Amino acid sequence: MLNYWNSTWSLDEKQCPCDIHLCDYLEEKQFRNKTIFHFGTGNHHILGLRNAKSGLNNAVLGITASPDEYQAYIKLLIENPTLGATYKAYFGDIYQLDARLLPDLDFASLFHVGEYRTEHNDKYGALTDTQMIMLCASRLKPGGEILFYTGSFAYDKSFEAGAEMLRSQALVEAGEYKSLKIFRKKG
Ligand SMILES: C[S@@+](CC[C@H](N)C(=O)[O-])C[C@H]1O[C@@H](n2cnc3c(N)ncnc32)[C@H](O)[C@@H]1O
């Protein structure tokens, strides 16, 4: 069986501010017309919604492994069709990501690395955390960024993957923004 998330997540800035901090980052730096891949939409879909409201015209592709969160997206889109112009969400396991289906990215927000990857994913040959991160890194444009969440309970996994990216010299550390750790592709 797919290692799906049989749960749902409402916006909770105190417990998990990462999506809000990503919205703040994009708005504060005025990133426009960018391509963003977002791991973990939540049932609130705040990134897609705030991006649409901001007028920054970034194209956001979100993934959720929660049937409930996906249903929330379907409802949002039916009630607000203009949202679909800049925000697409799909249901699936990020550890089955296929590089052939990912566009060239300006940002990949991988806030939940290591939180949900278990031996259940191994049963169907899914990617490991590091493989998934390196795949996203390979789809980044020069100057594109991978963002991790320093408040994740599995942040040590992101940290290890970050070290691996540095070793491969594909990306460099590019500081932090609020709770987010940034790695930037050279070039
Ligand atoms: C704790 S929620 C956080 C949601 C949102 N990023 C936030 O911070 O408010 C974790 C998110 O990861 C997603 N998720 C869990 N396992 C996943 C997987 N294997 N592939 C894709 N998304 C997954 C869930 O669907 C959910 O949206």
Image: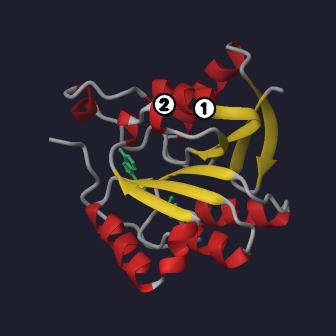
Residue most toward the left? 1
**Separation of residues labelled 2 and 1 (CA atoms):** 7 Å
Q: Image height check: is 157 above or below 54?
A: above
In the displayed structure image, the side of residue 40 where residue 51 appears, left or right = right
Residue type at mark 2 is Ala
Frontmost residue, 180 versus 46: 46
Whether residue 12 is visible here, answered yes or no, is no
| Residue 88 % position (x, y) | 48, 61
Measuring 63% from the left and 73% from the top, which residue is drawn there? 52
Check disc 2 and report the residue beneath it: 99
Taking the spot 14% from the left edge, 41% from the top edge, the residue there is 1
Residue picked out by circle 1? 139
Q: What element does badge 2 sit on?
A: helix
CB under 8 Å between discs 2 and 1? yes
In the visual, does 65 lie left or right of 28? left
Q: Is residue 67 above or below residue 92?
A: below
What numbered label is drawn on residue 58?
none
The image quadrant that residue 165 belongs to is top right
Counting other residues with Cα less than 10 Å from the Cα at mark 2, is it few (<14), some (14-19), or many (20 or more)?
few
